[in-house]
Image (cartoon, helix red, strand yellow):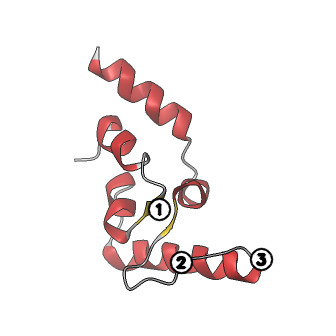
Amino acid sequence: MITYQSQAEIIQKPYLSITDVRGLVPIGYQQARKIITEIRDDLEKEGKPTFRTKQLLAPTSEVLKRLGLNASVIRKQAKESVV
């Protein structure tokens, strides 16, 4: 189950994996992989540095943009739901 608390923990990381992306939104493995691959390809086209690692990773900020998520809102909701 995806909660604001679990999302808040995930977005603390500088880079996200396929598993992390799936922890943010309810999507399948292939769709999460496609998102990360597209982000990495776009960053390379823009001339921005990317890490080519065995495990597919993408910057958290880019993943949040692509998914239409707001880190501030996630953190705020996570705090409020704890109280």
- Which amino acid is tagged 1? Tyr
Nearer the observer: mark 3 or 2; the answer is: 2
Which mark is drawn over residue 15?
Answer: 1
Q: What is the distance, in whole Å, between disc 3 and disc 1 at their CAs?
A: 18 Å
Q: In this rendering, is residue 77 above or below 65?
A: above
Q: How many labels were placed on the picture?
A: 3
Disc 2 target residue: 51
Q: Residue 55: where, in percent of width, then height? A: 37, 80
Q: Quadrant of residue 27?
A: bottom left
Pointer 1 or 2: first along the chain = 1
Alpha-carbon neighbours of circle 2 within 10 Å: few (<14), some, or many (≥20)? few
Q: What secondary structure is marked by label 3? A: loop
Q: What secondary structure is marked by label 1? A: strand
- Which amino acid is tagged 3? Glu
Q: Residue 44: where, in percent of width, then height? A: 69, 81
Disc 3 target residue: 46
Tags 3 and 2 in contact by the CB under 8 Å rule?
no
- Which amino acid is tagged 2? Phe
Tags 1 and 2 in contact by the CB under 8 Å rule?
yes
Residue that appears at 34% across and 58% down: 26
In the rendered image, the residue lying farthest to the left is 1
Q: What secondary structure is marked by label 2? A: loop
Tags 3 and 1 in contact by the CB under 8 Å rule?
no
Residue 69 vs residue 60, the one in the foreground: 60
